[in-house]
Image: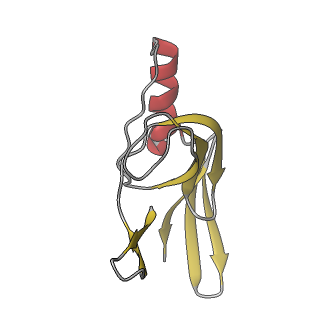
Amino acid sequence: RKVQKEGSTGSVQTETKKIQLTVDVKAIEYDSAGDCIRFSGRNCEESQWVKLGAHHTLDIELHTRITIGKECWDFMHLEALDQATDVHKSSEVAVVLLEAGTANFHLLTTVLAKDVHRV
């Protein structure tokens, strides 16, 4: 998050800080070109940098560490998460796209297309 600090002389400095947010997710979309999932919702916990109820859109990319919380986790939800996050378990089709000098390998599931390798 970009935060602004005002110095004693009135000058304003902007810096980027990594912060932890608790967000009540209202919308989710998958960006296959950017290979990320975009969540949007409102902040549930006030902090020094973020006001309670502030709207946020977060991009979660591959290898980004997140914690997902839900009041009730049942077997159906856990199984759906397991299948959705392991492309090797649920791949239905492997695709090779050939262009001039480039081969792109993709694995396709019912919910995503994963770019797995380029040669």
Q: Could you say where residue 10 lies in the image, as x and y percent from the top left?
A: 42, 80
Residue visible at 35% across and 48% down in the picture:
65
Along the line of sight, the residue nearer the viewer: 55 or 51 = 51
Q: Farthest residue in the bottom direction?
A: 101
Compared across the picture, whether 85 is left or right of 29 comes to left
Q: Could you say where residue 20 lies in the image, as x and y percent from the top left?
A: 36, 47
Compared across the picture, whether 34 is left or right of 68 comes to right
Residue visible at 57% across and 59% down in the picture:
106
Looking at the picture, the colour scheme in use is secondary structure
Q: Quadrant of residue 98?
A: bottom right
Q: Could you say where residue 90 lies in the image, as x and y percent from the top left?
A: 52, 37
Instruction: Check the picture and name the quadrant holding the N terminus.
Output: bottom left
Compared across the picture, whether 41 is left or right of 50 comes to right
Along the line of sight, the residue nearer the viewer: 2 or 26 = 2
Q: Farthest residue in the front direction?
A: 9
Residue 30, placed above or below residue 23: below
| Number of numbered discs visible in the structure rendering | 0
Residue visible at 58% across and 87% down in the picture:
101
